[in-house]
């Protein structure tokens, strides 16, 4: 077979990091070894895979097709390794947690501290996801456990869920110099439509992206995370809802102004979710902890 998992890992690293040198460093190899491996593969296949511009290497169409399909194989191989490890001792080599951006990451640190204190050898990997991206992380195998997954689960089967809370405690806020700051009374939807909304970009890779509180036809500035959204609204770049725990300090400091709207924001459920095919001991430990009312209250304070 001309294409190996090792070659797919090399292509993945080059594409993500943009050069053979950076990819070699991440894989703890020398650049010449990577160049030789790629050149041999191109020779064996009778095609070129990269466009080379100085030190930067960019996949061409053939290379992109190979890597896109190859990443499915890499995920499958990675899942196989984890499954073998779980069968061997019951504790996962790694547990991947997708945390929705609406929950501050520091709120799960006490949970992690208790897990590490118990001496479990499982490594924890946390990713920040937004809106449908938290569900997407489960469906694509990027995560084993999702915390704060918003809205209804996707139609695909194979999930178990536990309701964390119903998300209602959000504040509509604008900068003091924004035109809506001087608006009297509840603001109607047709007035909101005239102003740019600041939203966090959905991190879904395969599922359809979701939006919350966005009006059809409204101008949008998409930012990478919740703190960038706060900063953009403080800068007067647009409008939007913010979690109360983030909005109140900015309002108290005079950097934002709270406004009421004519149409109430719908309540959105937040879930803990996991794939039912997995029963590793680390996953079960977190599921049990997240079912505790004190733990969920600490995670969701200021969200409901």
Image (spheres, rainbow, N blue to C red):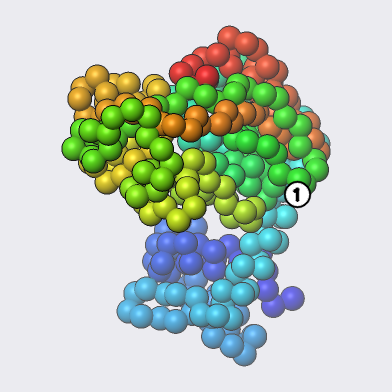
Left or right for 67, reference 59: right
Nearest to the observer: residue 196 or residue 244: 196
Residue at the far bottom in the pictured view: 46
x%, y% of residue 210?
57, 47
Whether residue 117 is visible here, answered yes or no, is no
Nearest to the observer: residue 4 or residue 98: 98
Nearest to the observer: residue 70 or residue 234: 234
> Which class describes the residues within 10 Å of circle 1: few (<14), some (14-19), or many (20+)?
few
Number of marks in picture: 1
Q: In the rendered image, which residue does mark 1 sit on?
A: 80
Left or right for 73, reference 22: right
- Vertically, is 302 above or below 196? above
Whether residue 45 is visible here, answered yes or no, is yes
- Residue at x 70% of width, y 61% of height: 73
Nearest to the observer: residue 166 or residue 148: 166
- Residue at x 60% of width, y 69% of height: 67
| Image quadrant occupied by the N terminus | bottom right
- Residue at x 58% of width, y 17% of height: 296
- Vertically, is 199 above or below 7? above
- Residue at x 38% of width, y 54% of height: 219
x%, y% of residue 199?
42, 45
Residue at the far top in the pictured view: 294
Q: Secondary structure at mark 1?
A: helix
x%, y% of residue 61?
55, 80
x%, y% of residue 206?
63, 56
Left or right for 23, reference 131: left
């Amino acid at each position: 077979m001309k294409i190996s998992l090792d070659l797919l890992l090399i292509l993945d690293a080059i594409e993500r990091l943009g050069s053979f040198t950076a990819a070699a460093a991440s894989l703890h190899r020398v650049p010449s070894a990577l160049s030789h491996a790629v050149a041999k593969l191109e020779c064996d296949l009778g095609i070129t895979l990269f466009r080379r511009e100085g030190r930067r290497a960019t996949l061409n169409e053939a290379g992109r097709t190979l890597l896109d399909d190859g990443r499915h194989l890499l995920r499958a191989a990675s899942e196989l390794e984890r499954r073998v490890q779980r069968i061997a001792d019951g504790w996962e080599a790694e547990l991947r947690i997708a945390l929705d951006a609406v929950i501050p990451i520091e709120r799960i640190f006490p949970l992690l501290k208790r897990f590490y204190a118990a001496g479990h050898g499982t490594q924890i990997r946390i990713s920040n996801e937004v809106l449908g991206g938290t569900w997407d992380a489960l469906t694509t195998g990027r995560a084993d456990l999702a915390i704060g997954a918003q809205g209804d689960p996707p139609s695909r089967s194979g999930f178990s869920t536990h309701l964390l809370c119903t998300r209602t405690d959000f504040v509509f806020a604008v900068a003091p110099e924004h035109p809506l700051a001087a608006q009297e009374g509840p603001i109607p939807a047709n007035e909101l439509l005239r102003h740019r909304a600041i939203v966090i970009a959905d991190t879904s890779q395969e599922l359809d992206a979701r939006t919350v509180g966005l009006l059809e036809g409204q101008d949008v500035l998409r930012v990478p995370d919740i703190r960038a959204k706060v900063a953009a609204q403080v800068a007067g770049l647009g409008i939007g809802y913010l979690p109360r725990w983030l909005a109140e300090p900015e309002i108290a400091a005079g950097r934002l102004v709270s406004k009421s709207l004519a149409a109430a924001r719908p309540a959105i459920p937040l879930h803990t979710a996991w794939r039912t095919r997995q029963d590793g001991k680390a996953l079960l430990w977190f599921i049990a902890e997240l079912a505790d009312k004190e733990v969920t209250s600490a995670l969701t304070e200021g969200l409901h």
